Image (cartoon, coloured by chain):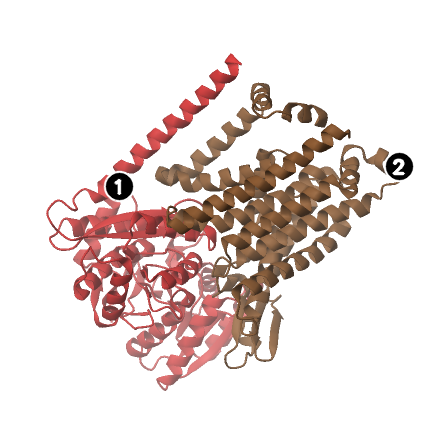
Amino acid sequence: MNFKNRNRSARTDMLTYLGVTVAFIILTVLKSTGALNRSQTGLLVPICCYIVMAVSLNLTVGIMGELSLGHAGFMSVGAFSGIIAAMSLADIIPSPGIRLAIAMVVGAIMAGVVGFLVGIPVLRLRGDYLAIVTLAFGEILKELITCLIVGSDGKGLHILFNITGSKTADDLHLLEGGRVIIKGAQGATGTQTIATFTAGFILIMVTLLVVQNMIRSRTGRAIMAIRDNRIAAESVGISITRYKMIAFVTSAALAGAAGALFGLNYSNLAAAKFDFNTSILVLVFVVLGGLGNIWGSIIATVVLYILPEALRSFATYRMLIYAIVLILVMLATNTAQMKTLLGKLIPGRKKEGADNE
Amino acid sequence: MKKTLCLLLALVMVVGMLAGCGSNAGNSADNETAAPANNDGNPTFKIGSSGPLTGGAAIYGTAVMNAARIAVDEINAMDGIHFEFQAQDDEADSGDKAINAYNTLMDWGMQVMVGTVTSGSGITVSAQAFQDRTFMLTPSGSSVDVIKDKDNAFQVCFTDPNQGTGSADYIAEHFPGAKVAVIYRNDDAYSQGIRDTFVAEFTAKGLKVEYEGTFTADTATDFSVQLTAAQSAGADILFLPIYYQPAAVILQQANQMGYAPTFFGVDGMDGILTLENFDTSLAEGVYLLTPFSADADDARTQAFVAEYQKRYGEVPNQFAADGYDAVYIVKAALEAAGCTPDMSAAEICEALIKVMPTITVDGITGEGMTWAATGEVSKAPMAVVIKDGMYVTPEN
């Protein structure tokens, strides 16, 4: 990588930070002046969550070059551990902002730990096999969370693992004033919604800092070297397992933080929400935005998340239209003409594209 | 470059055309229901509903919306309060999509919510509506959590545990002196909940359940042990607070062993007549507690069923009936509270919360429906008996 190249990537990074910040400021101003209606305001936090999901998945799929189909599993681990943390600390820490921060950290740590455990068997595989196994782990995580019954009272946290399906929230035997946080298959109900758009913005910035700095660092170059030629990378002494694990765990932890934010934005959340479809949805954001392209992921997420809402006037046909638009966009952005056009509009892109190929 | 431009323009055109089609279609759909309103000086309220209109649970959402449209059109044809109705899709999602649908309705100016259709989204939306102070009447969200600790949320359907109480009352009243046995699934919140309240109510009446048998999802294929025990306990009524699939197995096995008690089910039994490869003659004489039967002979039900069949080409189910009643309940509540359309959603909410426990509404899912301040409905449970493959009102 020559100096000029390096300069350009640094500039792209800065532009990404700048773009996100400007968007945040504009939206905050619009929100405070009342220019955004309810449904637009309601979309802000989930969009932040999905942006973080897409950027973190891009680390696995785009940078590490392995197809992961279980990303929503990590999101659910983060969501439910974050909800447990925030709800059980409700009496000790009254400030919602601090609780939200703690919940996101807890969510990130838990998802990171699970990512590490899942990564041990998964990262021994490659290509299609890896994709299928991540898919299986995503489903396993969902099923395990479905069995969880969690409550908290004066004596602390009570956790039941309802594997036979014969237990209910009453089996927690909570003290007076205790509350049930997660009710098995019904999921978390009665969660206090403490997520905010500002927290979402901070999470995006942290994610961008982590991911973009990792890509430009020694670690990132090692990960991309493994992606491009595994044998060559191994021959120069790069530890394949180590670097793959770093990327995978980072990706999982960020997804966990996004999950915690998402979980604390809704008073009711069931594990069934984080199924295979959610994983694929995030993967679509990543693929449409361009593999390895961070700001592409952000824009694709925003557009594709708003699209189904914008199409509400189509009534029952809206998901059909959504699919058609998706196909058209995929086809259009993938043609040589479009690439040339984009190359002309965005100076430097063409050359970068050529470098990657 | 020219090619690129062509492609781009073509794309823009296609999208534009699609968008054009869509918005026209949307407008005409809106006009269909909204047209009669506003013209003749009748006070017009905006009511909205959200439910699954696409995806696996779409059958429920569509039924509620279809029936609500019928009710709105009927009301708009009369003098007095008129409605504008809008339905939004929440895909039965319990998270972001439920809130997105609700927010869209609020942006439209919804004053009263006739939703949600499913319990999962109901819990999410009712919490939000509680904060916003929006009145919410769910036609079919039967979970207790939808209305729990929220003074603004009310139900049209029975809560799951209420069915147990209703069944116990019905059996005690109509089968005095009968010996009752219960077979229920103890790994299912629905079945367990109904059994708990059934036994509690039955015992409170000084009666005794002769035998209780349990099964789980894994043992739902053989009931010979439970049936033999029930038979030797001399039970002549078998209460089955379970879904129709295991109930069908029980009916079959009881028939094989020559045990013929009166079977009594709840709304989960609804559907047994359409179960594939099931000999429906076995279901003859089965009682079930369901809020709605399309074959009921009262004029209102018949008119509703006929209109529904005319418009949508199928027999309305229990969800449709709940949706139909919900609109009429909102009308009755608005009239009782003396609300006017210029009131905000929050003002209407406070007014309706006050009148809901005081009003009584006759609907097609029950006569004389009243509400507790907690949001639970109280209505006489309607029992039907299966005769010649049809639900009919029992004679005794």
Q: Position of residue A81 (x, y in %)?
A: 61, 62
Does residue B273 appear anywhere in the picture?
Answer: yes
Q: Which mark is residue B30?
A: 1
Q: Which mark is residue A236?
A: 2
Q: Amino acid at mark 2?
A: Val
Q: Position of residue B262 (x, y in %)?
A: 37, 70
Pointer 1 and pointer 2 on the same chain: no
Which residue of the protein is positioned furthest toward the bottom in this rendering? B206
| Displayed quadrant of residue B240 | bottom left
Report which colour depicts chain B.
red
Q: Residue at x 29, y 76 (%)?
A: B174
In the figure, B61 relative to B222: above or below? above
Left or right of A317? Residue A126 is right
Q: Chain of mark 2?
A: A
Q: Amino acid at mark 1?
A: Asp
Helix, strand or loop at disc 1? helix
Q: Residue at x 50, y 79 (%)?
A: A177
Query: Mark 1, residues whose alpha carbon is within 10 Å: few (<14), some, or many (≥20)?
Result: some
Report which colour depicts chain A.
brown
Give the number of marks.
Answer: 2
